[in-house]
Amino acid sequence: MIYCGVDIGARSIEIVLFDGAQIIGSMVTDSGNSPIENGRMAFESTIEAAELKPEEVTATVATGYGRNYFKGADRSCSEIICHAKGVSYLFPSAGTVIDIGGQDSKLIEMDGTGRPVDFVMNDRCAAGTGRFIEITGNVIGIPVERMNESVSPEDGHVDISSMCAVFAESEIIGLLQGGCRPQVILNGVFRAVARRTMSMAGRAKVRKEVVFTGGVAKINGVALALQRETGIEMRIPHNPQITGALGAAIIASEKAPPTI
């Protein structure tokens, strides 16, 4: 039996096919200007790449911002529950999920069995999200896909004092004009994102082991900055973007009708 999870976010779409024991196919693509249509196309492409037919998918669960608009889903589920479920499948002893995507960031506290007991989310401000890092990259001339190869901790850092992405952009331009190296600025932004993420924790506790997910988890400098802020080593999945879709697929498998 094949189960599918579809995570339609503000910046990206993730699809996972799960056979009840392991991932048998996945895809990550941009949401673009038509996330619902792009989600449908990604769903069909993932099934085709796995050499399956749509009717061979037993159940599909949708999550993310666009979950209620995806017509191919049997039902939808909260992204908090899906991320917790996906992470606990990959890291059974996980106690905390830090997920930083393009447009939001969230911290999920779990009870050790994969169930979320509390969470906090930043979805109102670009600071502390991938968008802030992307804006910085555009200003300093280092695109996101080149950051790992272009920047290292040995480059040093500068403190970014503005906690608003709009004001921080002006601060970054001023630093460039003052002769500050782009790598130093970028390390400062990584630290600012980490501080912003941890400052929103509030009532949700950071419990070991901590798993870092989302597209931003691919950026080494942010993971290192989070480790400095928490004093805890970050565990990062092989593909940190698909944990929400994976969790949705697992939930689809748990709710599937029994076989005869």
Image (cartoon, rainbow, N blue to C red):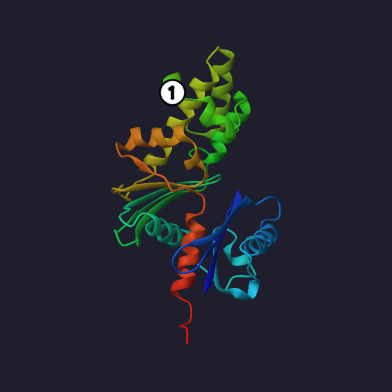
Q: Nearer the viewer, residue 187 or 237?
A: 237
Residue 79 position (above or below residue 168): below
Residue visible at 44% across and 57% down in the picture: 83
Q: Nearer the viewer, residue 119 or 100?
A: 100
**Position above or below: 40 against 1:** above
- Is there any visible trace of residue 78 in the rendered image? no
Q: Secondary structure at mark 1?
A: loop
Percent x, y of residue 61: 53, 68
Q: Is residue 17 left or right of residue 205?
A: right
The residue beneath circle 1 is 159
Q: Is residue 139 above or below residue 17?
A: above
Q: What amino acid type should be assigned to the residue bearing mark 1?
A: Asp
Q: Position of residue 4 (x, y in %)?
A: 55, 67
Residue 109 appears in the picture as rendered: yes
**Rendering coords of residue 215 (x, y %):** 52, 44
Residue 228 vs residue 188: left or right? left
Left or right of 238 in this view: 144: right
Residue 153, position as x, y percentages in the image: 42, 24
